[in-house]
Amino acid sequence: MKKTTRFRQLLASPELEFLIEAHNGISARIGEEAGFRGIWAGGLCMSAQYGVRDSNEASWTQVLEMLEFMADATSIPILLDGDTGYGNFNNVRRLVRKLEQRGIAAVCIEDKLYPKTNSFIDGDKQQLADVDEFCSRIKAGKDAQADDEFAIITRVEAFIAGWGLDEALRRAEAYHAAGSDGILIHSALASASEVLAFQREWAGRSPVVIVPTKYHATPTDVFREAGFSIAIWANQLLRAAVVAMQETARTIQREQNLRSVEDRIAPVKELFRLQGASELQEAEERYLPKRQARSRALILAASRGSALGELTEHRPKTMVKIRGRPLLSHIVSAYNAAGIKRINVVRGYLPEAIDLPAISYADNADYADTSELVSLACGLGSDPDDSMDLYVSYGDVIFKRYILDALAETEDDFAIVVDTEWHESVNRGRAADYVSCTQPHSRRAFYQQTFLERAAEDLPENSIHGEWMGFMKISAAALPRFRGMVATLAAEPGSRKAKLHELLTALVRNGEQVRVIYTTGHWLDIDSLEDVVAAGSFA
């Protein structure tokens, strides 16, 4: 049913109906959720939410813009407090067309001069419009509407201006004859005597709307018995919000914390609900292209790094500062730069010292008596999600983002990155994970796929093709197989000290193809104090 039709039903209802004030999209939705069947877009509150006076200081186009948000946020009809129509007959007919375009069901215009002043501010000093001129606004508005059920309500301000009942009736009759769909009779008295007197004399010639702001103590049953069509609660939502905001602001300023207010205000998720955030998520599922399997990372950072001496006395190696930031922070930043935000870190030595935000953690309580394979098993066990690709790396290796990009380009179930400059590690006599591959690094290897044959720390130099950099990618499809193999190996008593290069060899032995991506440099394994110094330049 059209909103205009639904408003007409409220207007013609034999029962007293109610509209609630709203001044923006979220207050309109709150009003609808509370059970109201219509909204009053009041001039006072629409102006106040902009922080200006109710004297047409907010332009009518600004009002239209807010109305559009309100109409989009709700399914119930909206009656706009259109002040005087923002000008003469020409302004009114343009206003009606624009309201219809935005799905507004009705407008109320008042018989005062433009620009208007709020009726409760020196009302007896305010000038009323000439009756014939105001009737021209009504006629022009009715002629301009495209939808026959769009309603124009005329607000009689005779009581506000101190002109009495006879003038109120004279004006209402003229407006009714000009095509008004209903009369809003307004009063600033603390009692309902004026509006009740008008209703008795009007005798049901057209629907009558009231705004009981000043005579709020009058029982609602009085309005029902009198036969009024609609009662408008015209400003209570904004006034309630002002009190709550003032008290909350004073409390926060005074206490300089949120402890005493957080339990008394709406949770952020309630704002998301009122904004319709869940609908957007559902729409994204329907309309956005399905992405390839997303990726997550598992960082093994259980070791102390005792070779760094005092640097790791009170923190694990992954938390040693590099250019003022923990080593782990640099690693996480590199993953984030590659679009990988879901990161799990396996801790061991002083786990409480690893506390970077937005990261999940798993702990290897036996880190002192185990090695990399057991830490990997701990990490896999803490996150059983096999819906996305997994990147595995170490918590003491910093790297440039392109290494992850190179891995991301492969569609193989298993892929590793191998550094072609492996001689430096041999010459320095440091432990390294050397690999033998199906072919050495060459131009041909760039065009033809290369796969791992074996990985170990003690490969003969004549069979070494590179140094594994500690990066491994496992596809989502291969993760269940990978989990099974890791769990089996980690359960073997002789594997408690096993390192990941042994896992790589086991994968090949089990018939898996491990793709090799050759690169040159752009990573650094932090094993010594010299490496810590070098990392400062690298980072």
Image (tube, grey):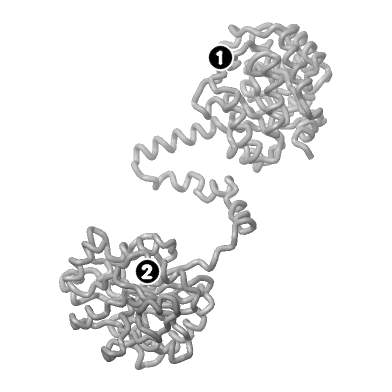
Q: Quadrant of residue 80?
A: top right
Task: Give, as a three-letter code, the residue at label 2.
Answer: Ile
In the visual, does 279 lie left or right of 185? left
Is residue 31 placed above or below 108 in the rendered structure? below
Q: Where is residue 160 drawn, in percent x and y?
A: 64, 12
Is residue 457 placed above or below 389 in the rendered structure? below
The alpha-carbon separation of the residues under discs 1 and 2 comes to 70 Å
Crowdedness of circle 2 by 10 Å Cα count: few (<14), some, many (20+)? many
Q: Quadrant of residue 108?
A: top right
Q: Where is residue 172 drawn, in percent x and y?
A: 76, 13
Residue 176 visible to an observer of this rendering = yes
Q: Specify the label residue 403 is tagged with.
A: 2
Q: Quadrant of residue 114?
A: top right
Task: Give, as a three-letter code, the residue at label 1.
Answer: Ile
Q: Where is residue 95 drawn, in percent x and y?
A: 68, 23
Give the labeled residue for mark 1. Answer: 121
Of 322 and 152, the residue lying toward us: 322
Rendered-image quadrant of the N terminus: top right
Badge count: 2
